[in-house]
Image (cartoon, helix red, strand yellow):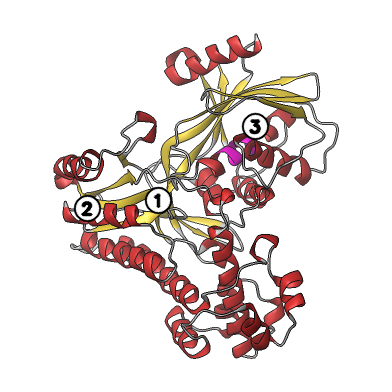
Amino acid sequence: MATEGPARRRIQVAEHPRLLKLKEIFNSKFGSIPKFYVRAPGRVNIIGEHIDYCGYSVLPMAVEQDMLIAVEPVKTHTLQLANTNPLYPDFSTSANNIQIDRTNPLWHNYFLCGFKGIQEHFGLSNLTGMNCLVDGNIPPSSGLSSSSALVCCAGLVTLTVLGMNLSKVELAEICAKSERYIGTEGGGMDQSISFLAEEGTAKLIEFSPLRATDVKLPSGAVFVIANSCVEMNKAATSHFNVRVMECRLAAKLLAKYKSLQWDKVLRLEEVQTELGISLEEMLLVTEDALHSEPYSPEEICKCLGISLEELRTQILSPNTQDVLIFKLYQRAKHVYSEAARVLQFKKICEEAPDNIVQLLGELMNQSHKSCRDMYECSCPELDQLVDICRKFGAPGSRLTGAGWGGCTVSIVPADKLPSFLANVQEAYYQRSNRSLAPEKQSLFVTKPGGGALVFLEA
């Protein structure tokens, strides 16, 4: 249940090869053994892209790939962080002076986000230190939420060290808020599914208030993740935050057009709720209120009756103040149509018609088209990979995660799976000589996995 905290399991570490290896590395690194271990999974978003921060529901599932942290509380006030991957250097800092550098999203900053979020939630100072060893097997910058999994894992580590309790929902909300310390204005899907996931089911995640509903996926099909091998780091580029701001500006212009209190509005969903109309009707309002040509900052000011200075200081975030064009019509069209597709997807799963796989596939295809053309968050490699997946038997395929690189997710009838995997492997990876390094985990079937939990050695 979402009102409970994450599960705690007593286990024999010797029976779990990955934990055992982590314990051994920890011992050689710190000269002691971990007190406990925490895991938090990555996720694949099946449908509902770039709409959580607009207030709309999304439909992800947790993947089995995760972040795993071995932990030992220590008497000093030093936080010592190490990673099993040599690409990520060790880091240590005072537990009472957490500084998160927004200009350089290094791996340890994501841990510090989760740590600081819990620290601030309880208003604590004089925190105990800890030794932590991180082991992640989620491909980085792949759109499967490796960074949010690390934030969630760190939040749960900190909570456990403090001996405090929080529900899964509270943890998800704290971690969603605290990830913003690194500068990404995300919406909360990634942290919510990391804590609220349950094995065997996808989840419809709704916001304000945060809640999760089971969505039973069709038994005759599997979901396959394929990595485009183009890396995208949300915190290191401005694409993501520019889209968040375009949605906010679109919401304000739509609200003004409909004589609502536009200065209070932040999300596109608020406009729909205030007007009390359907998503389909919101698409019609968007057609009337916004033009398809890009808006300049000056035109936005004119529409809202404010000065450029007010726009810069009161509405735009620091990293969007120099943007010269905003595509408001396209972004609003994507959000309202994508929000409707999520609800249709859930409805089809519930009704389970004979052609369910075909119908869900069509929605995924529409989603990709909208991400590519209206939200412009795809890239040539993702488009090519989606085409290949459809060509070799996927009724539906789309980019997943923020986009601009990362992974695709495809729905594939179970009986077509072996030929699908072989053909996609050859057509996308071998033919184009792309990296098939095992850590890229280029192509794999995924099942809905469980959420974050704590392991204690029995």
Identify the amino acid type marked 2: Ile
**Which of the marked residues, 2 or 1, is nearer the chain's N terminus?**
1
Residue 202: numbered disc: 1
> Along the horizontal axis of the image, is 238 left or right of 350?
right
Report how far apart the C-alphas of labels 2 and 3 lie in the structure. Answer: 41 Å
Disc 1 packing (10 Å; few <14; some 14–19; many ≥20): many
**Residue range highlighted in magenta:** 150-157
Left or right? Give the position of 442 relative to 335.
Answer: left
> From this viewpoint, is residue 362 visible?
yes
Q: Quote the CA–CA distance across marks 1 and 3.
A: 25 Å
Q: Residue at x 60, y 89 (%)?
A: 257
Image-quadrant location for residue 139: top left
Q: Indicate the secondary structure of the residue bearing disc 2.
A: helix
Q: Residue at x 24, y 45 (%)?
A: 428
Q: Is residue 260 visible?
A: no
Q: Label 2, label 1: how many angstroms apart (C-alpha)? A: 25 Å
Q: Position of residue 60 (x, y in %)?
A: 43, 52
Residue tagged 2: 388
Label 1: element kind: strand
Q: Position of residue 66 (x, y in %)?
A: 47, 35
- Mark 2 or mark 3: name the one nearer the start of the chain: 3
On screen, residue 6 above or below 187: above
Query: Image point 31% across, 33% down: which residue?
Result: 436
Question: Where does the C terminus fall, quadrant-wise?
Answer: top right
Query: For the residues carrying marks 2 and 1, which lies nearer the camera in this image?
Result: 2
Question: Which residue type does callout 3 highlight?
Answer: Val
Amino acid type of the residue that numbered disc 1 sits on in the rendered structure: Ala
Which residue bears the numbered disc 3? 157
Q: Nearer the viewer, mark 2 or mark 3?
A: 2
Classified by dominant secondary structure, the portion drawn in magenta counts as helix
